[in-house]
Image (spheres, helix red, strand yellow):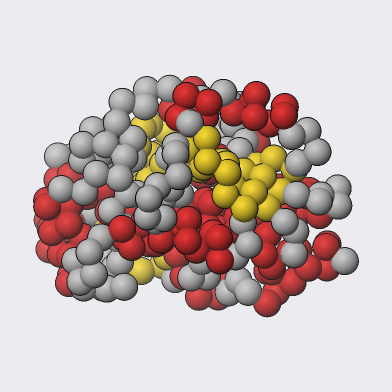
């Protein structure tokens, strides 16, 4: 029965036909002789948005094959992954638990409230204990565990299919995407073509282990090259100074492109800066992956951004 429910998620809830490749070419990009398209993966579903389904799909399929009684995962109070996992488990009618980093806040975030509404049981653990996730997993061997952010080979394998949504993927010289755990980035690298440069924009400050985390998920047979940029975190994970807010507003006004304060806003800004500095060379054809995560904007006061 659960496997039937798994198949029904893609058939009844996710609309891959909604994904578009949105050109965002302006005088600024044209001045540097660069073309930029945005792959709007955020449009497949309002909750399992962007890269989330792709990273989760093989874990969830395996969980249904194993007839898992409880699915458990990790994340922070504003984790897109937590919400997506909660909603997917709700659709599969499999109980789920979210192990949340830090003490229970006095006021629950929109993320935690949403996860609860989909039936996820929230378990708060200290930041110190959170550093040793393996010990927590060992305490609950009967659970089917999904790593934070879907990190793992299954998550990267699922993320490979993101590039399948872009027509004529081979025409792009560069593929740019925000990255947290590196799972989606690894999938994109695995699927990219020879001669293409994949650029990850780290959302975290000083996460210099990220390159190694990505390499652990690669097969060694990848045709594309990759780099990770660490200078565009705007002060750290989730930090959103006025410069970033103004930039996100500008992108909405120019392109009708909604971006978020945690991942895609910073990554799009980084891409533009790299084009202007010719780190992305003149004459490049760039694909930006819109990986979703717009629910992160719910932490802002109402009306801060001109889109919901």
Front position in the image: 146 or 197: 146
x and y percent of residue 19 in the render? 49, 70
x and y percent of residue 144 in the render? 75, 43
Left or right, 284 with respect to 54, comes to left
Left or right, 106 with respect to 45, comes to left
Front position in the image: 88 or 210: 88
Q: Give me the residue at 65% from left, 24% from top.
A: 135
Quarter of the figure that contains the C terminus: bottom left
Q: Is residue 9 above or below residue 104?
A: below
Q: Is residue 182 above or below residue 3?
A: above
Q: Give me the residue at 63% from left, 74% from top.
A: 13
Q: Is residue 142 above or below residue 127?
A: below
Quarter of the figure that contains the N terminus: bottom right
Image-quadrant location for residue 134: top right
x and y percent of residue 259 in the render? 30, 61
Front position in the image: 34 or 295: 295
């Amino acid at each position: 029965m659960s496997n039937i429910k798994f198949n029904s998620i893609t058939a009844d809830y996710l609309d891959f036909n909604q994904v578009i490749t949105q050109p965002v070419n302006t005088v600024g990009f044209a001045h540097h002789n660069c073309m930029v398209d945005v792959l709007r993966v955020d449009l497949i579903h309002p909750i399992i948005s962007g890269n989330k389904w792709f990273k989760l799909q093989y874990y969830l399929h395996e969980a249904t094959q194993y007839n898992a009684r409880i699915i458990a995962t990790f994340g922070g109070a504003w984790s897109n992954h937590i919400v997506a996992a909660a909603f997917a488990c709700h659709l599969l009618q499999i109980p789920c638990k979210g192990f949340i980093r830090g003490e229970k806040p006095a006021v629950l975030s929109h993320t935690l409230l949403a996860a609860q509404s989909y039936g996820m049981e929230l378990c708060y653990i200290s930041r110190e204990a959170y550093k040793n996730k393996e010990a927590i997993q060992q305490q609950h061997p009967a659970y089917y565990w999904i790593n934070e952010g879907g990190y793992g080979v299954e998550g990267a394998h699922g993320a490979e299919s993101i590039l399948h949504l872009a027509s004529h993927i081979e025409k792009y010289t560069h593929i740019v995407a925000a990255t947290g755990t590196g799972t989606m980035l690894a999938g994109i690298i695995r699927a990219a073509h020879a001669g293409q440069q994949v650029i990850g924009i780290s959302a975290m400050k000083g996460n210099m282990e990220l390159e190694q985390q990505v390499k652990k998920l690669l097969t060694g047979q990848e045709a594309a090259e990759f780099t990770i940029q660490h200078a565009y975190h705007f002060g750290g994970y989730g930090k959103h100074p006025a410069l970033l807010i103004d930039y996100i507003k500008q992108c909405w006004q120019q392109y009708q492109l909604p971006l978020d304060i945690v991942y895609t806003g910073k990554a799009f800004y980084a891409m533009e800066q790299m084009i202007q500095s010719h780190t992305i060379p003149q004459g490049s054809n760039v694909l930006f992956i819109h990986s979703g995560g717009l629910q992160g904007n719910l932490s802002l006061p109402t009306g801060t951004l001109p889109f919901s």
